[in-house]
Image (cartoon, rainbow, N blue to C red):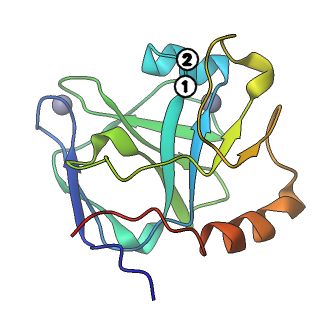
């Protein structure tokens, strides 16, 4: 039995939005795509897929930003504009939380990395599985099962 030391608290840069995670992540990721490079102002985004029932905004009202697209809804703090989490249309059973919003993200390791075809040449991560774009849909059950047996966990 893995102890994830839930719940986790988190929030944006200015503190107007606060978040709570009460369910273990399904998968952890780094994404090297150029969209994530722009939205993070950095080399890659870091995220944890959290079951929707285990994710709550406890303070503030995040607003949609980013692409304002029909497929991915990127949520930001309305005051400091930090990118907080993403919901994907048709996949409302999980939320992709930007893990650096957690008050203690030190435990985090990306289990997979995506879109290495677009990565900055020097950018490397410790991800166990690497994909030039996204994993094929039929790869996810195996990835989730493998992630569930991993050992990096938050400290008590
Ligand atoms: Zn804020
Ligand atoms: Zn990306």
- From the viewer's perspective, is 40 left or right of 142? left
Q: Quadrant of the C terminus?
A: bottom left
Q: Which residue in the protein does label 1 denote?
A: 44
The answer as to whether callout 2 falls within 8 Å of ligand 2 is yes
Q: Position of residue 7 (x, y in %)?
A: 24, 71
- The furthest residue to the bottom: 1
Q: Position of residue 1 (x, y in %)?
A: 45, 89
Q: Which image quarter: residue 80?
A: top left
- Whichever of labels 1 and 2 marks the residue nearer the N terminus, that label is 2
Check whether the beta carbons of the residues at disc 1 and disc 2 lie within 8 A of each other. Answer: yes
Q: Quadrant of ligand 1?
A: top left
Q: Number of numbered discs present?
A: 2
The answer as to whether callout 1 falls within 8 Å of ligand 2 is yes
Q: Position of residue 32 (x, y in %)?
A: 64, 26
Q: Position of residue 146 (x, y in %)?
A: 70, 69
Q: Which mark is residue 37?
A: 2
Label 1 and label 2: CA atoms lie apart by 5 Å
108 or 70, which is in the foreground?
108
- Residue 126, relative to residue 56: is it above or below? above
């Amino acid at each position: 039995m893995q102890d994830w030391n839930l719940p986790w608290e988190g929030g944006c840069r200015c503190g107007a939005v606060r978040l709570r995670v009460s369910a273990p992540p399904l998968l952890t990721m780094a994404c090297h795509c150029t969209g994530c490079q722009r939205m993070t102002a950095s080399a890659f985004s870091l995220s944890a897929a959290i079951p929707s029932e285990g994710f709550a905004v406890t303070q503030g009202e995040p607003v949609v930003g980013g692409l304002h697209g029909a497929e991915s809804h990127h949520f930001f703090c309305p005051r400091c504009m930090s990118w907080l989490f993403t919901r994907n249309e048709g996949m409302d059973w999980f939320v992709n939380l930007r893990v650096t919003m957690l008050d203690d993200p030190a435990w985090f390791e990306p289990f997979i990395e995506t879109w290495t075809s677009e990565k900055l040449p020097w950018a490397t991560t410790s991800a166990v599985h690497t994909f030039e774009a996204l994993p094929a849909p039929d790869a996810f059950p195996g990835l989730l099962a493998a992630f569930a047996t991993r050992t990096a966990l938050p400290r008590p």
